[in-house]
Image (cartoon, rainbow, N blue to C red):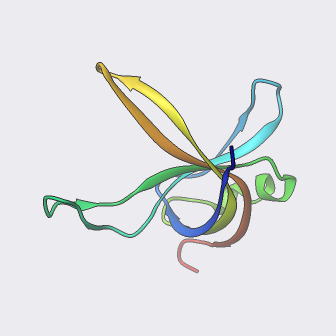
Amino acid sequence: MRFLQGFAVAVAVHDAEIKHSETGAPYVEVLVQFDKHAGARGVPYAQRITFRSFVTEDIERCPMIRTGAIVGFEGTVDAIVIQKNGRVFANPRVTGRILQVAEVGA
């Protein structure tokens, strides 16, 4: 099976957080969203994904990634499967590196 590789520019929905994997490795995680557009029923919709990076330089950038910051990134795409209220959801996730951060108010 092949994997999806991609790059994007999106807006941080929340401040980035430093978390630790099951093996104890630190990583930075941020929920980002792309431009809003009209969905199938005309309701505004914005795709959100979780981005994470295990790169030391990206972890050091964590304080710069606040709500509203524009984040450019690249990486490998997969999905997290979540069961909630009897329904199954697949939330996209990108694991990679940060290319650029435009801070809020910059």
Q: Residue furthest left?
A: 41
Label tally: 0
Is residue 1 or residue 40 the one in the foreground? 1
Q: Residue furthest top?
A: 86
Is the residue 23 above or below the residue 53 in the image? above
> Quadrant location of the N terminus?
top right
Is residue 60 or residue 94 the one in the foreground? 94
The spot of residue 100 in percent (x, y) is 70, 73
The spot of residue 48 in percent (x, y) is 44, 53
> Quadrant location of the C terminus?
bottom right
Is the residue 49 above or below the residue 81 in the image? below
Residue 82 falls left or right of residue 61:
left
The spot of residue 54 in percent (x, y) is 79, 47
Residue at (53% x, 77% y) in the render: 105
Is residue 62 or residue 41 the one in the foreground? 41
Residue at (64% x, 63% y) in the render: 6
Image quadrant of residue 18?
A: top right
Residue at (45% x, 28% y) in the render: 82
Residue at (23% x, 61% y) in the render: 39
Q: Residue furthest right?
A: 56
Is the residue 59 above or below the residue 106 in the image? above
The spot of residue 14 in percent (x, y) is 50, 52
